[in-house]
Amino acid sequence: MTTYEMQQEIIRLKKEKNICILVHAYQSHDIWEVADFIGDSFGLTQQAAKSDAETVIMCGVQFMAETVKMLSPQKRVLLSNAAAGCPMAEQMDKEMIEQLKEAMPDYKVVAYINTTSELKTVCDVCVTSSSAVKIIKAMPEEKILFIPDCNLGDWVRKQVPEKQIELVHGGCPTHVRITAAEAKAAKAVHPDALLLVHPECRPEVTALADYAGSTTGIMSYAEQSDAKEFIIGTENSIVQHLQMKCPDKRFYPLSKDCVCHNMKLTTLGDVYDCVCGRGGKEIQMDASLIADARRCIDAMLAYGG
C-alpha cells in the first residue's frame, strides 16, 4: 500500500465510522493530510468537543488525549500510539504539588496544559502557551506558582511584572536543547531571517527572538509576515509544514536537535490501524477524575482562555 492509498483508506474509513482525527502540529505531513483538525493541544480538544463524531483519534501524546476525554467524556477517545507520552507532563506528580501548596498556602497554582489529568486535580487554573499571559493578568490573585515549565513561566513573568510568580524547575526536554549559541550562529548564517521561537525555549534564546509564541502562533506569524526568511525555534516538523504552506518563503531550523521523539512515534500506519479498529490506546477516565481535573480548565475558560 502506498502512502496515498493508505491516506485514502483512512479518509474513507473515518467517514464511514464517524471518526474525528485530531493531529497536533508536530506530526508529520502525511498525517496532517488525513486530519479533520490540526493545531495545538487545547485548540484540538475544543474542536473535538464541537464535533458530532462518536470516536476521536488524537495524533499527539498522552496528556492531549486525556484532555480530549475530559471535555468529551461521552466519546470514545484513542491515542494513536500508546507509547507517546510527554516527559514534561510527567516531571511532577500530585504529591509534589500538594506539598508545595502546603508550604505556599498564599499561592494559586497555575498549570500549563502540558500536565497529566491527575496533576490537574490539585491545580487552580490551567493555561496554554498562547493564553498564559492573558489568564494570569485576569486572575485577581497576586501570588502565582507556575508549573511545570520554568522557561515558559519566566517568559510569562517578564510580561506580567505586577504579579509575584514563582517557578518550579521543569520544562520541555526538546526545546531546552536549543542554545543561545545556536541562535546566534543561525542569525549569522541567515542575517535577513526573522527568528521565531517557542517560549518553552531557554530565556537567553527567547531574548534573541523577533517573535515568541505558541506553535500555531509561530506558524500564523510566518504566514502573515511580509518577511521572506525565517529561523524556526520549535519542533523541526514545523519547518516542513511552513515550507508547504508558504513555498515562496524560506524556512530554516534553529537546531537540528529540536525533535520531539514522542511525537515522532506516531506513524500513518498507526492512524490506519486505529480507524481499522485494531490499534491505539483507549483513554479511560472515571467521572470523579474528569470532574476534579476539569476544574482548572473551567477556570481558564472563565478567565477568557
Image (cartoon, rainbow, N blue to C red):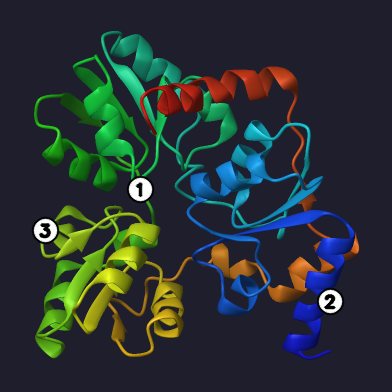
Q: Nearer the viewer, mark 1 or mark 3?
A: 3
Q: Is residue 257 rendered to the left or right of residue 32?
A: left
Q: In what quadrant of the picture does the N terminus appear? A: bottom right
Q: Is residue 176 rendered to the left or right of residue 94?
A: left
Distance from Cα at disc 3 to Cα at disc 2:
46 Å
**What x and y, as percent, mark residue 93?**
50, 30
Q: Nearer the viewer, mark 1 or mark 2?
A: 2
**What x and y, as percent, mark residue 119?**
52, 28
**What x and y, as percent, mark residue 68?**
64, 41
Distance from Cα at disc 1 to Cα at disc 2:
38 Å
Q: How many marks?
A: 3
Residue denoted by label 3: 207
Residue denoted by label 2: 9
Q: Which mark is residue 171?
A: 1
Q: Can the viewer see residue 278 in this picture?
A: no
Q: Earlier in the sequence, mark 1 or mark 2?
A: 2
Could you say which is closer to the camera, residue 71 or residue 123? 71
Q: Residue at x 33, y 46 (%)?
A: 130
